[in-house]
Image: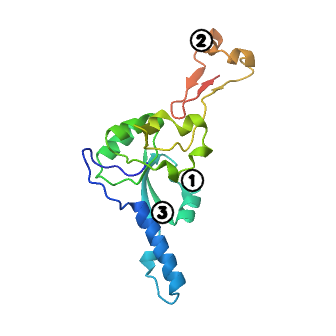
Amino acid sequence: MRKNRSTGPAKRTDLTRRKIIKGAGAASAATVLGAPLILVPPRAQAATELNMIAWYGHGEPDMVKEFEETHNVKIKAKYYAGGDNMLALISQSPPGTYDLILSDGEFVQLLNEAGYIEEMNPNEYHMDDLYDEYTNFPGHWKNDKLFSVIVRFGYLGVSFNTTVISHEEAMDYNILWDKKLRERWVILTGICPISAA
């Protein structure tokens, strides 16, 4: 997903940040190869800053350093604590504030309906590297147009103490209502899996 923008019709141009970055890279390469004695101002060599809104931790150096070095960009992250909080932050920000939005799948549709995200070109992504169910993930497409790409997925699971319940018992969700687990299980809402005592 790219940057947020206001609702309503927007004038479209062929000039995008991606094209500017690509053009600047090509121009820099041509300058260096064609006229190696020309000095390039330090500012022209500086990394492009990308503003990202994401879950806590996704903008930390161990998460973005390799990407920043590979693409000569600097990620400036603003964190949110839930989808509703993310929508509020975006709606209260001027259009174009965020270049990247890391959102849960169910909020992508809301971002799209509000006009906060732009259409993406599926040819710019390695869609064939994804499992089929994620290549055509319904929330990421609208009217056969791509608006987001899945970057991670996982499965929710049940963790349990094998000294309290057996593997066989854990295979049935009804164990959560067993009297021996009364007041001994918890739902972790931050990461969503259910843990049983």
Q: Which mark is residue 177?
A: 2
Residue wearing tag 1: 63
Q: Residue at x 27, y 47 (%)?
A: 6
Nearest to the eye among marks 3 and 2: give it: 3
Q: Where's residue 32, x and y in %?
A: 52, 82
Q: Quadrant of the C terminus?
A: top right
Q: Residue furthest left?
A: 8
Q: Secondary structure at mark 3?
A: strand
Q: Is residue 166 visible?
A: no
Amino acid under disc 2:
Trp
Q: Position of residue 136 (x, y in %)?
A: 52, 37
Q: In the picture provided, is 97 more to the left or to the right than 21?
A: left
Residue 190 vs residue 165: left or right?
Answer: left
Q: Residue 180 in the image: x percent, y percent?
A: 65, 12
Q: Residues within 10 Å of mark 1 (few under 14, many from 20)?
A: few
Comes first in the chain, label 1 or label 3: 1
Indicate which disc residue 74 carries: 3
Cα distance between the residues tagged 2 and 1: 39 Å
Question: On screen, 197 above or below 27?
Answer: above
What element does badge 1 sit on? helix
Q: Residue at 44%, 66% (x, y): give it.
A: 21
The reply, left or right, for residue 58 in relation to residue 13 is right
> How far is the residue under mark 3 from the one under mark 2?
49 Å
